[in-house]
Image (spheres, helix red, strand yellow):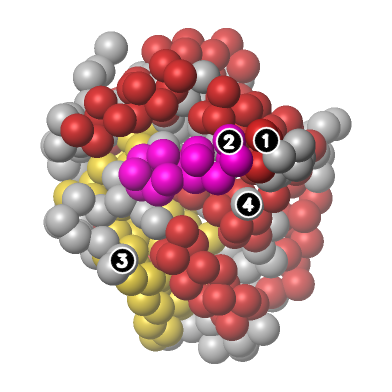
Amino acid sequence: MGTVDCEIENYIATITFTNPPKGFFTADMVEQLGCILDELADNPEARVVVFTGGLPGVFIRHFSVEEIISWIPGMKERRAEGQPDPKFARTPLRMVWEKIDNYRKPTIAAINGYCGGGGCELALACDIRLAGAGDYTIGQMEILVGILPGAGGTTRLARLVGVGKALEWVLRGRTFYPEEAAAEGLVHHYIKGPVLPAALEIASEFVDKPASALSAIKQVLRSSWGHTTADGVDEEGDLFGNIISNDPRALEMMEDYVASGHKMKKF
């Protein structure tokens, strides 16, 4: 079972994701993360939150496709009984990622390896993204297994790099090596050495700054968009649920991906 661990040192909370052997994220890990974030929210000993991966070369590879496939029979059964589809925009995954997006304290993604799908969505929800050196990629690659981002990947990516770039990247499932990700604006900084020490150094800058001022800066900037992230993710989540429950090709591609031992075909 995957674990989400938290350590606090020098007023910096470091949250580490570990799920060997491949580093997929699961519903259980989402629940663990949500509980940790709730505990940290009112903890004065934690003034900044840093996220990183616990496996070598993996931040969060992506959300478990096996789990997504497991949801489909229940969705079909509910539909056959005339029950409404579940609101995928209101799933725990989406809600926890939104919690990060709206967190009062500064958040930093210390990307130390593969960061795709739900992992990239988590990173996009953070205030600052750093990518360490390594032979790995970052991006929203969901279309390569027949689906679309379901927890904010389309909306947050478009707001970060613009609709034009986001369309091309998400439609093609494009991913980027760390240095490319920095050049394209997907992450703020490319770190030539280990990324966690660099993230902790930046985090230390916030420790002695007024928490209320940091929170206000985040609130004002996040609300500067005419259309809220929540509205965009609502639409995205509904589309995600509709596709995985209705499109046979989406299920086929996800099953092929799982059967191949998680070998993903790139563009």
Q: Nearer the viewer, residue 217 or 165?
A: 165
Dot 2 falls on a residue whose secondary structure is helix
Whole-angstrom CA distance, mark 1 to mark 4, is 18 Å
- Where residue 82 appears, as percent x and y from the top left, is 76, 37
Magenta range = 63-77
- Quarter of the picture holding the N terminus: bottom left
Q: Point out the frontmost of discs 4 and 2.
A: 2
Q: Which residue is mark 1?
A: 79
Contact (CB < 8 A) between labels 1 and 2? yes
- The quadrant in which residue 174 appears is top left
Among numbered discs 1 and 4, the one appearing first in the sequence? 1
Amino acid type of the residue that numbered disc 2 sits on in the rendered structure: Lys
Q: Which residue is mark 2?
A: 76
* Residue 113 in the image: above or below residue 149: below
* Residue 229 in the image: above or below residue 107: above
Q: Which residue is mark 4?
A: 91
